[in-house]
Image (spheres, rainbow, N blue to C red):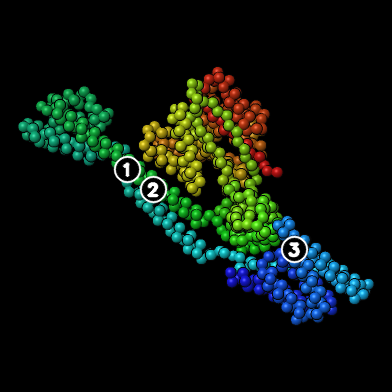
Amino acid sequence: MKKERLRQMLIAMIGALMCRIGTGTFYPLISGYFAAALLKEEGNWLLGILAFAGMALSLPLTLTIKYSLTLLVIWIICRLCKWLDGKCLTVTAALAALTAQICISFGGELLVGNLKSAWPIILAEGIVSFASVFLFARVLIYLPLLSDSSNHPRQRGADQEKLLGYASSFNGLARSLGELHTKKEDFTSEELGRIHNEVTANICLSCNQCALCWNTADPPMGKALIDYISSLHRSGAADEQATEELKENCIQSEKLAIEATRVFERASLNLAWYNRLLENRALIAKQMEAMAYIMEDCATQAIDRTKENRISIASLKYLAKEQGIALEDIHVLEKRDGRFSISLEARSRQGNCILVKSLTGCVIRAFDMDMVPHKDAKAIIGRLPVPITYEEDTFFQCSYGLARRAKDGMTISGDNFSYSENNDGHALLMLSDGMGSGSNACKESELVLELMEQFVEAGFSKETALRMLGVACVLSDQEDTYSTVDVCDLDLYEGKCQFYKVGAAATFIKRGEAAECIPGGSLPVGADISASIVAAETMVGDGDFVVMITDGVLEDMHVLSPEDTICEILETIQEYNPTKLANQLLERVLVFTGDEAKDDMTILVAGIWEKN
């Protein structure tokens, strides 16, 4: 607030000094500066007082009256324009200065009968006033630059260091959890020995024949019991030979066999729970790694470039003022991918409604970049400040089309899809095929896509999101929750296309009359948390199509290589509408299946075009 008052005082004092710049009856900068200062709409009363005081102290009485009337006419014209149109353009203020200056001067000279000799000076004074309005309007817009910065680099630096410290701690915990133990695939010889000792302790020690059976260094009874336990270990059930050998050497063979089976099953269950505990510990470690990644990303995601763009910011304020928009709290950020983002608060100077589209044009002109408002930004600027974020516009645009058919005899498809565009200029296409068909499969695939969307929106990378998705499915209380996930991440700035597949079918790229195949993945998500994520990358350009399908499209085509057949079909289709292309592809596939759908069939097509 103090800086704001100091700035108003500075503007008013400069206005008073303008009364000393001139000669004789020629003081055109007074009206020019006053008209330009009126456009700022701040401290006008102070400006008027100091301007009048400056004229009274510096100019003769006649000139003081002349220029006071001139400033009054300029003020009336500017206020009238703001009342009628909600804004006053610089050219309007300049014309007001020109008109007022010439009219008042002509009237004064006409009264004294000196118009014939004074008209060249009057005309020149009006022209200088007109031009000076544009000059001063530009100069005054730079005054608030030193006081507009609301950045706090020290505080932000401390917050970044704190986040990076948290990230380091989480990474350390993740490493500790991952290094504690390794998964056990089988019993060790020591563990098998403990099973043997427990069985003998429970049965043999209470038997009257114990001394006879175990009286030698290498008793036959010991070998028979070891063979029986080894048989349980190999196949889960004792074979006939081990059972017969145990009967020959033990009078309580049946009781001993039951006890050996019980102890071995308990040990097997303990081994399974031990491995499951290690899996959960590994899952927690991966989640900590993901959290550390997000913290590091938040700490280093953008660089403040506000100071380097002060001239552009000043130009933006000037252009926005011309549209009747006041801007505050402007920040220019450079993101990790090198793209720029501009955040600001905008309000209407006169309280009327102004389209954000008007401000967008100002941003593009000021920064000489194609910028678009955030997709969630409001469309109208009103009396109250509205936060708006601008992002660099993408080079490509994307639209999608869908074709699907449920399994024969089913009314609901188990396949689901998702399409979204985020603020980083990426389009995300996803397909999921739930296990089986019908409503249960539909719910499974829908849940998988919802979780995937939430993870990505939260800031997780695609690979991390897929791993956490596997964690969620493994830890869920639903049985047999296995779904494929097919993700296509399209960079609309550069045309780079990345594919992430977990159990998904192949994807195809159609480039004119050529087509290529991106191979599919392995196990579906939820089947194994250690399942690998198949990733691939390619470039797409203007007029290319990305064709994503579920495995039901490739099944029962009765050809040696369904993928090659799909490529051949795509090469022959001459269609540039994604929906029509998807429908034509589905119709051609059904020709190969005899118009039968033995599984849910879904085709998602995305078309990529350059923006004009």
Figure quadrant of residue 190: top left
**Horizontal relation, residue 278 to residue 409: left or right:** left
Q: Which residue is mark 1?
A: 277
The answer to whether 48 is drawn above or below residue 229 in the figure is below
Q: Report the amino acid beneath label 2.
A: Ala
Q: CA distance from mark 2 to mark 3?
A: 66 Å
Check the image and report above or below for 310 versus 557.
Answer: below
SS at mark 3 in the image? helix
Tag 2, which secondary structure?
helix
Q: Residue at x 84, y 79 (%)?
A: 24
Q: How far across and how far down the image is residue 275, in percent?
A: 32, 40
Q: Name the quarter where the N terminus is drawn.
A: bottom right
* Residue at the spot of label 2: 285
Position of residue 113 measured from the top left corner of the image (x, y, whole percent): 92, 75
Gap between marks 1 and 2 measured at Cα: 12 Å
Question: Which three-letter amino acid code belongs to the residue tagged 1?
Answer: Leu
Q: Is residue 341 visible?
A: no
Looking at the picture, tell me which residue is in the foreground, 221 or 396: 396
Mark 2 surroundings within 10 Å by alpha-carbon count, few (fewer than 14), some (14 through 19), many (20 or more):
many
Q: Is residue 588 left or right of residue 524?
A: right
Position in image of residue 586 (x %, y %):
58, 26
- Helix, strand or loop under label 1: helix
Q: Which residue is mark 3?
A: 78
Closer to the camera in the image, 237 or 67? 67
Give how far apart the Cα atoms at labels 1 and 3 are: 76 Å
The reply, left or right, for residue 266 in relation to residue 506 is: left
* Label located before the other in sequence (2 or 3): 3
Q: Earlier in the sequence, mark 1 or mark 3?
A: 3
How crowded pointer 3 is (Cα within 10 Å; few <14, some 14-19, many 20+) is rated as many
Estimate the x, y position of residue 370 in percent, counting from the top left.
67, 51
**Closer to the eye: label 2 or 3:** 3
Res. 478 in view: yes
